[in-house]
Image (cartoon, rainbow, N blue to C red):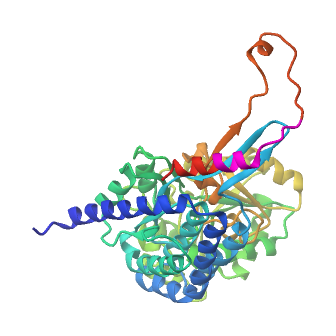
């Protein structure tokens, strides 16, 4: 009997999860050294194939720039690896002899990895690496618009991981991506955690699945150029960030905000560095093209060049040399499309009368869309940076750096990651830059230090240093790991 596409895709998910469950049993009893060897192999393979996979991603999706996609692949393969190489994720993580406690890291289990079309290959490398470091199998659900490059990336790192000792089924990917398959993957009893990177609807579906999830909301970060900033340097950083991979990183700037006294200098710097400032008529013309009728972002602008966007929107006066389109915006919310996330080469521009109005506008923008994600500020006044950081609803506050690259930890010392949690304010279960330590559970072993009589008012038990029986503790760890089989 020939099943239709949806039924075939759901059956494939069940088969992949059965294989992942077997792999989980093998990974759970591996040593930290064995998991580290697998992680290192993924790093090497990702770096070796970084350009080829970048080329595939751009050719298949039409989003971004090949050279920047290669940088993102190398960031996931190399920069991330350097950050997690020496992390302890498995077995005894910490021992407090004074308080008689031991922390033991255990894998969470099978992970469902949702992969977007904007950052397809780098996301696969990143998620596979943090899962293997933590001892978790991962089953990828690819965006249909990037299925081929995602599948090839999975094949590259799967082969490398298995040659380094990973069990079969530890890294796999749905080959017939459908909504039904993704829902089946997220809702299956075998799936223990969802790593959701994608559109708002997909992230919401992940949190509604009944399975624990780490999802990320929309980015809509405003960039404030303070009067103490080096304006030319601030504009350079903003344009470098916005043009990186044609604006497809969700931490990239979506609007520039300034006080009225800064408007002439900022706009002069924008023009000098290749931004095209739309006039009032052009602003209206492009505004009708940014969003679809239902209020969601028009995919035609995502990751496209300025020339492509200008042609599609009928903007005939935009020069071929233009790097970014900048449009004046005066409001936030429905009817103000430049106040929303634009994963392309378009920036909104807000001019406010004073600093207090700037702060209120930044809060308003983030609360409209992008709460909990990222905010950037360019200033030489540390106290101003701290004041804004305390007030804005953002999990990442970036000072004097390109926001797209600073948010993911490429130009800052934040943890290098391609899944950026937005915290409770953004509807996310974490505000972290997600890494292996977010993908383990910690069992805590605690020796008794008091008896009931002491709780009823007796003298406290001495907190003398406890000598832990190492052999007993090792047997305990083995028993705990065995329960995961």
> Residue at point 63% right, 67% down?
252
> Residue at point 81% right, 47% down?
387
Q: Nearer the viewer, residue 150 or 164?
A: 164
Q: Is residue 466 magenta?
A: yes
With 25 as the anchor, is 260 left or right in this view?
Answer: right
User: Over which residues does the magenta segment extend?
Assistant: 465-476
Find the residue positioned furthest to the front: 471
Q: Nearer the viewer, residue 240 or 174?
A: 174
Q: Is residue 308 visible?
A: yes
Q: In this picture, is 323 found above or below 466?
A: below
With 318 as the anchor, is 13 left or right in this view?
Answer: left
Find the residue positioned furthest to the left: 1
Q: Point out residue 159 in the picture as x, y percentages from the top left corner.
A: 48, 80
What number of labels is visible? 0
Q: Nearer the viewer, residue 376 or 174?
A: 174
Q: In this picture, is 416 found above or below 44?
A: above
Q: Is residue 238 magenta?
A: no
Find the residue positioned furthest to the top: 457
Q: Quadrant of the N terminus?
A: bottom left
With 423 as the anchor, is 8 left or right in this view?
Answer: left
Q: Point out residue 221 in the picture as x, y percentages from the top left corner.
A: 64, 59
Q: Point out residue 98 in the picture as x, y percentages from the top left corner.
A: 85, 38
Q: Point out residue 2 in the picture as x, y percentages from the top left corner.
A: 12, 69
Q: Is residue 291 visible?
A: no
């Amino acid at each position: 009997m020939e099943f239709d596409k949806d039924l075939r895709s759901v059956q494939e998910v069940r088969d992949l999860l059965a294989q992942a469950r077997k792999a989980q049993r093998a990974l759970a009893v591996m040593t930290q050294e064995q998991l580290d060897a697998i992680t290192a192999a993924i790093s090497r393979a990702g770096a070796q194939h970084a350009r080829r996979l970048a080329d595939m991603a751009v050719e298949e999706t039409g989003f971004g720039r090949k050279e920047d996609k290669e940088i993102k692949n190398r960031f996931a393969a190399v920069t991330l690896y350097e950050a997690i190489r020496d992390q302890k994720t498995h077995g005894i993580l910490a021992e407090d002899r004074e308080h008689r406690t031991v922390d033991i890291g255990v894998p969470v289990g099978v992970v469902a990895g949702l992969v977007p079309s904007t950052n397809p290959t780098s996301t696969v490398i990143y998620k596979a690496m943090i899962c293997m470091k933590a001892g978790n199998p991962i089953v990828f659900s690819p965006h249909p618009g990037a299925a081929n490059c995602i599948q090839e990336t999975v094949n590259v790192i799967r082969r490398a991981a298995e040659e380094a000792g990973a069990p079969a089924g530890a890294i796999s990917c749905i080959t017939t991506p459908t909504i039904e398959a993704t829902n089946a993957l997220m809702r299956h009893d075998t799936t223990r955690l969802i790593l959701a990177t994608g559109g708002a609807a997909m992230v919401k579906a992940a949190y509604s699945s009944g399975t624990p999830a780490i999802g990320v909301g929309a980015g809509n970060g405003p960039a404030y150029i303070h009067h103490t900033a080096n304006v030319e340097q601030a504009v350079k950083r903003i344009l470098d960030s916005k043009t990186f991979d044609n604006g497809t990183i969700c931490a990239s700037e979506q609007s520039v905000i300034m006080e009225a006294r800064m408007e002439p200098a900022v706009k002069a710097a924008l023009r000098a560095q290749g931004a095209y400032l739309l006039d009032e008529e052009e602003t209206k013309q492009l505004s009708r093209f940014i969003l679809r009728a239902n209020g969601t972002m028009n995919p035609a602008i995502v990751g496209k060049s300025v020339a492509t966007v200008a042609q599609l929107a009928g903007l005939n006066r935009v020069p071929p040399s233009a790097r970014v389109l900048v449009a004046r915006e005066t409001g936030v919310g429905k009817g103000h499309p430049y106040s929303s996330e634009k994963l392309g080469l378009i920036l909104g521009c807000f001019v406010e009368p004073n600093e207090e109005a700037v702060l209120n506008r930044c809060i308003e923008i983030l609360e409209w869309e992008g709460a909990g994600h990222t905010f950037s500020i360019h200033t030489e006044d540390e106290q101003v940076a701290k004041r804004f950081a305390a007030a804005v609803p953002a999990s990442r506050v970036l000072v004097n750096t390109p926001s797209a690259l600073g948010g993911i930890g490429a130009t800052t010392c934040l943890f290098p990651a391609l899944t950026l949690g937005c915290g409770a304010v953004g509807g996310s279960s974490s505000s972290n830059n997600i890494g292996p330590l977010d993908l383990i559970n910690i069992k805590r072993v605690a020796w008794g230090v008091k008896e009931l009589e002491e709780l009823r008012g007796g003298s406290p038990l001495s907190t003398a240093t406890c000598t832990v029986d190492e052999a007993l503790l090792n047997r305990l760890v083995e028993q705990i790991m065995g329960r995961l089989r």
